[in-house]
Amino acid sequence: MTMTDENGTAATAEVSAAKPAVRHLVTGQTAGGVPASPDTIDPDVWPGVAHAPSGTKALVAGKAAGLLFKAAVRRLPLRVAYPDGSVLGTGGPDAPVMTMVRPAAFNLRIGDNGLIGLGESFMAGDWEASDLAGVLEVFAASVDTLIPAPLQALRTLYLPRTPRQERNEEHNTRSNISRHYDLSNELFSNFLDTTMSYSSALFPLSDGALDSVPWDALAEAQQAKIDRLLDKAGVGSGTRLLEIGTGWGELALRAAARGATVYSVTLSSEQRALAQERIAAAGYADRVTVALQDYRAVEGEFDAIVSVEMIEAVGYEYWPIYFQTIDRVLAPGGKVAIQAITMPHGRMLATRNAYTWVHKYIFPGGFLPSVRAIESVTQQHTTLRVRERMGLGDHYAATLRLWEEQFLARSAEVGGLGFDAVFQRMWLFYLCYSRAGFQSGYLDVQQIVLDRREAQL
């Protein structure tokens, strides 16, 4: 999974995605299972979270931000409860509740850092929510109207650009990937299913049934997702398959079981090590090569190419070279199947230079494409054409809910690995923010098939 958010005003980048030392282990949980906020926060580990901004400029910005926030939530279907007993919002008794713990610190953070401050204030414990995804879904559904239009027009004046060191140039990309995927294989194993698949599953259900799909259905649904992609790419006995983005090896395993020869590339040394172990244990080491290699460096010719939720890590300006690389190594008659998280085209254009909370803490260098952007880039820069696509955003919401529930249930185990309370609140915010995007319909995920067939007249 590679997820980026769509908005925000940012602070400077900080080294926060590295695995923190055991300093502030979770000592309890709030209502709803949310990890309790830490009593103290080490500023060396969490420089953007340990202390709220201070100074005259921060006070002025914080006061203005607090007024804007209250004006926005007064018309939203949730309840925002303040320590003085006041409650804002139009939500009824069953609406999600955002409980302000330190409203002054909250205002300072959002005044200084916008939506980055929203995430940082949750990490610090300035506000709580027993239904965090529900609160964030309300914000996601209203993202275009949270800030008054005149202020939105000034976005380019105050939104910082992506730091140079986080752009996905070849010498930076491995560092960006490592900050997320090399955190710890054990961390991911605590909330992923036995297939170790970190992307949307495909359940044999739809509509409301997905709201209650159980954990024990996830592994089979992940395999169904993979099998559909392999089917669409025509992978079978003797197929030369290129996989861009190895993950922990499940797709390569299932392709090898079909009789394919797989060349899989990754920039995560942790993922590569575990993928190789799993492949060897299954007896497919002679059919699968897992290379620690940038996709741009791939050579050879392949009958099929599959890439699952990797394009989000490519970066807006590198989409042409991503698809040109696929075009260059795809054999005549070959097919491509990718799974991609997408956002609306207009929002994509409006936020392509934004630096966000997700960039700062979760996925440096990432950015979500639109379907229109994928079609445009392939038409302009390659001989590939989109032939088929299927949206499964509701399936991703269900997948994320299951990951979230499992992550909360394994809080003690995650803490035992050295991930402190701030990290756990950060990770929960990331999972819930992502789920909110799909539940609100703001985000989607698409399985897209491409080939070089001539357009039919």
Image (spheres, rainbow, N blue to C red):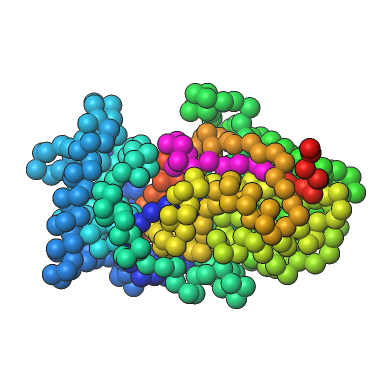
Asked whether residue 419 appears in the rendered view, the answer is no
Q: Which residue is outermost to the left?
A: 84
Q: Position of residue 175 (x, y in %)?
A: 55, 71
> Is residue 85 a member of the stretch shown in magenta?
no
Asked whether residue 130 appears in the rendered view, the answer is yes
- The residue depicted at 41 percent of the width and 46 percent of the height is 433
Quarter placement of the C terminus: top right
Q: Which residues are magenta?
A: 437-449
Q: Along the line of sight, which residue is nearer the eye, 157 or 280?
A: 157
Is residue 430 found left or right of 270 in the rendered image? left
Is residue 312 found left or right of 41 in the rendered image? right
Is residue 454 found left or right of 218 in the rendered image? right
- The residue depicted at 16 percent of the width and 50 percent of the height is 67
Q: Quadrant of residue 163?
A: bottom left
Q: Decide: is 154 above or below 374.
A: below
> Is residue 443 a member of the stretch shown in magenta?
yes
Q: Decide: is 220 above or below 384.
A: above
Is residue 381 found left or right of 92 in the rendered image? right
Q: Along the line of sight, which residue is nearer the eye, 318 or 392?
A: 318
- The residue depicted at 90 percent of the width and 49 percent of the height is 238
Q: Along the line of sight, which residue is nearer the eye, 227 or 341?
A: 341
Q: Quadrant of residue 115?
A: bottom left
How many marks can you see? 0
Q: Which residue is outermost to the right?
A: 238
- The residue depicted at 20 percent of the width and 50 percent of the height is 68
Q: Position of residue 403 (x, y in %)?
A: 50, 42
Q: Position of residue 274 (x, y in %)?
A: 67, 58
Q: Position of residue 416 (x, y in %)?
A: 45, 56
